[in-house]
Amino acid sequence: MKETIKYSKKLLEITPIFIYKINLDKINETPGVYLIYNGNNKIIYVGETKNLNRRIKGDISRGKKRYHSLLSILAKKYNLKDENEVKKFVLKKLKISFIEVNNTNMCKLIEAFLITYLRKNKILLLNKIK
């Protein structure tokens, strides 16, 4: 539990940046946890992945809503009609912070901890309730 809290605190301290400003070629192909923020710097989504590079470079920044549940949720919530609209929305409106965690089981624990912690603190997340 200590390690989960340590990683969670570290991730929450990272300043989010607009997705379009990320140098996508410098993101490693390692497991990790990420936070998605809206334009008002409010966390709207917590995610974990086995490959940060593929998730951010491939799924999120390209707006492939059929590949990622967050993008499908955003498309419905903001009435975005196609992947092009989703991509524009993501690149112009959303920010991200992420942290590498070289253990996929730990990634899942951190994600679950952060979702629970943020919801207890009245943060409205777009994550599906499991």
Image (cartoon, helix red, strand yellow):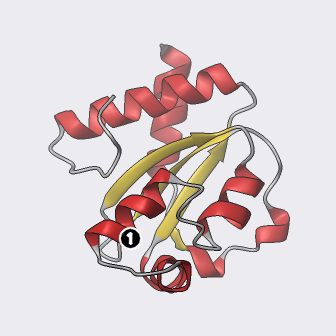
| Furthest residue toward top | 1
Residue 87 image-quadrant placement:
bottom right
> Is residue 17 positioned above or below 88 on the image?
above
Q: SS class of the residue under badge 1?
A: helix
Image-quadrant location for residue 101: top right
Residue 90 as seen in the image, left or right of residue 23: left
x, y percentage for residue 100?
70, 42
Q: Is residue 6 left or right of residue 30?
A: left
Give left or right: position of 126 versus 9. left
Task: Between residue 127 and residue 109, name the one nearer to us.
Answer: 127
The vertical placement of 23 against 48, above or below, is: below
Residue 112: x %, y % from top left = 42, 28
Q: Which residue is mark 1?
A: 75
Q: Residues within 10 Å of mark 1 (few under 14, many from 20)?
A: many
Image position of 128 with respect to 110: above or below:
below
Given residues 115 and 41, the one toward you in this image is 115
Front residue of 85 and 28: 85
Q: Is residue 87 above or below residue 55?
A: below
How many labels sit on residues? 1
Residue 2: percent from left, percent from top: 50, 16
Which residue is at 64% across, 80% downward? 21
Q: Is residue 121 left or right of residue 79?
A: left
- Residue 114 appears in which quarter of the rendering? top left
At 54% from the left edge and 58% from the top edge, which residue is drawn? 97
- Residue 128 x, y percent position in the rendering: 33, 41
What residue is at 83 percent from the left and 64 percent from the top? 26
Q: Amino acid at mark 1?
A: Ala
Quarter of the image with the C terminus is top left
Q: Residue at x 63, y 20 (%)?
A: 105
